[in-house]
Image (cartoon, rainbow, N blue to C red):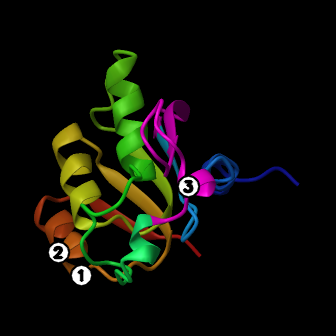
Amino acid sequence: MRPNWNDYFMEMAEVVKSRSTCLRRKVGAVIVKDKRILATGYNGAPANTPHCIDIGCYREKMNIPSGERAELCRGTHAEQNAIIQAAYHGVSIKDSELYVTLQPCVLCAKMAINAGIKTIYYKGKYPDELSLKILEEAGVKLVKYD
C-alpha cells in the first residue's frame, strides 16, 4: 500500500533519527516544501566533536531532568540540525513544513518560526508548554501526528 505524504515524510524522520548519537532520546527531523525534501537532521554532538554514545551523557551525569537546562547538553537538536543543514547548503526553507519525531522545544520553536517554517508535524510529547504557546502566537500550524 502506498503511504500518503504525511506518513511518507514522518517515516523518513523515523529513519533519520536512527543516526542520532544521543543516549537519552533519539529524534529525527525532515524539512519539506512542495513535497520535496530540503534538509534532514538528527540530534547529536556538533561535527568533529566526541559523541555522547562514545563519551557518555553530560546531562545524565549531572542528573538534569528532561525539558530543563537545554543549554547543558553536547547535542544539537534534530530540528536545529535540519535548519543548519539547509543554511549551510544555501537552501531556503521559507514556507516549508517540518516533520519531527518529537514536539519541538522552545529553542527549536523559535528557530522554526524565524526560519519561515509554516507547519510542524510532530509525534511525541515534550515537556515544554512554552514552545506550543509561542508557535501558536506566531501562526505556525501544529499537527500532532498519531
Residue 78 at x, y = what percent? 45, 50
Can you tell which mark lies on residue 55?
3
Given residues 87 and 133, the one toward you in this image is 87
Can you tell which mark lies on residue 133?
2
Magenta-drawn stretch contains 10: no
Residue at 69% across, 52% down: 18
| Residue projecting furthest to the top | 90
User: What element does badge 3 sit on?
Assistant: helix
Three-letter amino acid code at the position of disc 1: Glu
Residue holding disc 1: 129
Label 3, residues with CA under 10 Å away: few <14, some 14-19, many ≥20: few
User: What element does badge 2 sit on?
Assistant: helix
Identify the image quadrant of residue 85. Answer: top left
Three-letter amino acid code at the position of disc 2: Lys
Query: Is residue 91 visible to us here?
Result: no
Residue 142 at x, y = what percent? 34, 66
Q: Which residues are magenta?
A: 32-57
Residue at 39% across, 78% down: 126
